[in-house]
Image (tube, helix red, strand yellow):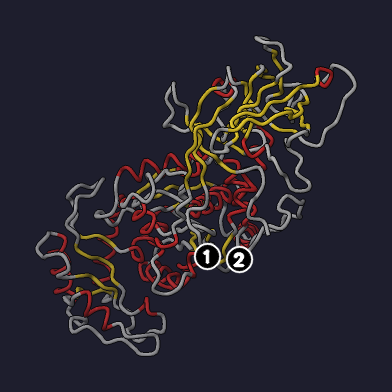
């Protein structure tokens, strides 16, 4: 695991290994400019790991005056949908990037088919009638060579005829496949006659029912890069064993030599990154949808109040490594705090209210305090905060028998009500069950800020006026899982067993009225509580606010 140790400290920026490769290529005149690509499969929503890849591919192109293509790897129609295509484009734009060209692997289906026939004619591909299980067994193991298919030595003419019949829909799914003819004893298992095409009878979101044979990733990816003239094809580390096969197809076809480079994928504590698992969480209603604020999806982070700037900062802090690692979620939270602290407006809200009555306040009197929207800009916009005889404070800001170093309100103790007066607790009212229903205080009229000599007390707490407070729903989010390292849970365990039952708590809160007039478009700070963002579920008579992150990391060691 890599942890953020003083992530805000200035550090000298060194080139990562991909930047070094690019600078060497440009200096040597290998390319006049670079062209990268982001190639998602439209079978789910993008997550924070994809965000890192987006920032890397688009960021490199921006840094070196190049361009980035968006190419959808739409080679499996049974799992893909236009919904995912649209969401991916929205996420990339939201992160602040724009692609040079929008392509689809399906744009190249005809050319890929022509090239497949070319490999057949060169004796480098053949049609295999074996079942999926027979092919799997025939590959052998790492220490044992594979077994050649009985159909491996078909003639070129027979292979061409069968492959064309596959395209024409003359066979059932699974009845035949096209395989590359390489080496069944190769130490790299991927070289043991890999599949190039399989039969799938499913409606494609772009090509309709034109095709019933679809290229495999290892066959389509490198050739698609080559067709676009991609100079630096940047993938995550699990594809490093695929690179020799990527190069093999390009070499045998004699086409533009795109080259693949691998970097460590992003693993984050307290969540999962598998699209299959995320889809299962959505389909089985463990979460409310792909954009549930507990999800690591980009749309989930956006709904939770994360900003594009904070995610780009996170990608920069994580950096580009050559080995897989797990990043602590606290670094991502630090990044959004760092961004919001500079820009977000401040308001007071009470999540668990208890009434505070000022007994020496003039009945019916209301005073307005003009508080800054953002203390970082003291000369900027301000908000009107009404102050009256009856207020609400947080229940845990009062304690009858407090421990040492408790600087909030106590019997006989004083605190300052933020932006306003110092009050002193004189009496506590309880219901028959012993629950505190009212705290009675007196206020010091001379303690008003700016009205005379400043008098300090150790505690300052927030509040809202009872008569002016606006009810809002506050959704308080926690880690989605109770286990930090979900990739290392005990063998045989179900990842869903580690779902956090307390990952969402909903409470009715009371907020100062200015909150409902905020049009900043980003998360605001509930003073002393954390950052909150207005949720799309909001309606005029019931605003909903999602907690983005607390003001401090509660999980620090």
**Please, is residue 73 above or below residue 485 in the view?**
above
Up-down: is 370 above or below 17?
above
**Residue farthest to the bottom?**
144
Point out the image quarter for the N terminus: bottom right
Q: Secondary structure at mark 1?
A: loop
Tell me how far mark 1 sits from mark 2, CA to CA. Answer: 9 Å
The foreground one among 508 and 437 is 437
Q: Are marks 1 and 2 in contact (CB under 8 Å)?
A: yes
Return the residue nearer the eye: 491 or 302: 491
Residue 367 vs residue 544, the one in the foreground: 367
Residue sticking out furthest to the left: 170
**Residue 408: x and y, percent?**
73, 38
Q: Position of residue 211 (x, y in %)?
A: 19, 54
Mark positioned earlier in the residue sequence (1 or 2): 2
The residue to which callout 1 is attached is: 485
Return the residue found at the far right: 453
**Can residue 72 be spotted in the picture?**
no
Report the side of 167 relative to 287 (left or right): left
For image coordinates 19% across by 73% down, the residue present is 127
State the mark number for residue 191: none
Dot 2, crowdedness within 10 Å: few (<14), some or many (≥20)? Answer: few
The residue beneath circle 2 is 1
Is 154 placed left or right of 116 in the picture? Answer: left
């Amino acid at each position: 695991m890599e942890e953020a140790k003083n992530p805000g400290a200035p550090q000298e920026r060194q080139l990562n290994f991909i930047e070094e490769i690019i600078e060497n290529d440009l200096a040597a005149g290998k390319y006049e400019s670079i062209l990268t690509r982001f190639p998602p499969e439209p079978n789910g929503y993008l997550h924070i790991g994809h965000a890192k890849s987006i920032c890397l591919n688009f960021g490199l192109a921006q840094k070196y005056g190049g361009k980035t293509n968006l190419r959808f790897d739409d080679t499996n129609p049974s799992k893909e949908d236009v919904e995912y295509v649209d969401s991916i484009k929205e996420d990339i734009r939201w992160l602040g990037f724009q692609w040079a060209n929008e392509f689809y692997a399906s744009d190249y289906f005809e050319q890929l088919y022509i090239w497949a026939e070319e490999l057949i004619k060169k004796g480098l591909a053949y049609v295999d009638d074996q079942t999926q299980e027979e092919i799997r067994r025939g590959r052998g193991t790492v220490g044992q060579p594979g077994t050649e298919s009985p159909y491996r030595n078909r003639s070129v003419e027979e292979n061409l005829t069968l492959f064309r019949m596959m395209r024409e829909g003359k066979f059932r799914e699974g009845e035949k496949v096209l395989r590359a003819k390489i080496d069944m004893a190769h130490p790299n298992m991927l070289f043991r006659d890999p599949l190039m095409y399989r039969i799938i009878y499913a409606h494609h979101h772009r090509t309709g029912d034109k095709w019933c044979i679809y290229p495999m990733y290892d066959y389509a990816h490198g050739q698609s890069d080559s067709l676009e003239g991609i100079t630096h094809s940047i993938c995550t580390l699990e594809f490093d064993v695929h690179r020799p096969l990527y190069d093999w197809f390009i070499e045998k076809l004699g086409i533009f030599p795109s080259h693949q480079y691998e970097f460590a994928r992003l693993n984050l504590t307290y969540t999962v990154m598998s699209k299959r698992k995320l889809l299962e969480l959505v389909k089985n209603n463990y979460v409310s949808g792909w954009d549930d604020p507990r999800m690591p999806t980009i749309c989930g982070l956006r709904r939770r109040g994360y900003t594009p700037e904070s995610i780009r900062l996170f990608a920069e802090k994580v950096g580009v490594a050559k080995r897989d690692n797990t990043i602590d979620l606290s670094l991502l939270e630090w990044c959004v705090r760092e961004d919001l602290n500079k820009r977000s407006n401040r308001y007071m809200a009470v999540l668990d209210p208890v009434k505070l009555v000022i007994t020496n306040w003039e009945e019916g009197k209301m005073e307005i305090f003009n508080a800054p929207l953002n203390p970082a800009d003291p000369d900027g916009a301000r908000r009107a905060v009404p102050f009256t005889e009856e207020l609400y404070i947080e229940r845990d800001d009062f304690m009858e028998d407090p421990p040492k170093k408790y600087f909030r309100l106590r019997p006989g103790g004083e605190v300052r009500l933020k932006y306003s007066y110092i009050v002193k607790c004189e009496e506590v009212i309880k219901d028959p069950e012993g629950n505190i229903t009212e705290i009675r205080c007196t206020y010091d009229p001379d303690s008003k800020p700016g009205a005379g000599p400043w008098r300090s007390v150790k505690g300052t707490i927030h509040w809202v006026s009872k008569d002016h407070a606006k009810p809002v729903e506050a959704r308080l989010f926690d880690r989605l899982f109770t286990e930090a390292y979900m990739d290392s849970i005990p063998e045989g365990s179900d990842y869903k067993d580690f779902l956090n039952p307390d990952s969402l708590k909903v409470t009715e809160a009371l907020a100062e009225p200015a909150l409902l007039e905020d049009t900043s478009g980003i998360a605001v700070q509930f003073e002393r509580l954390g950052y909150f963002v207005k949720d799309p579920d909001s309606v005029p008579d019931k605003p909903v606010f999602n907690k983005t992150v607390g003001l401090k990391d509660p999980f620090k060691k």
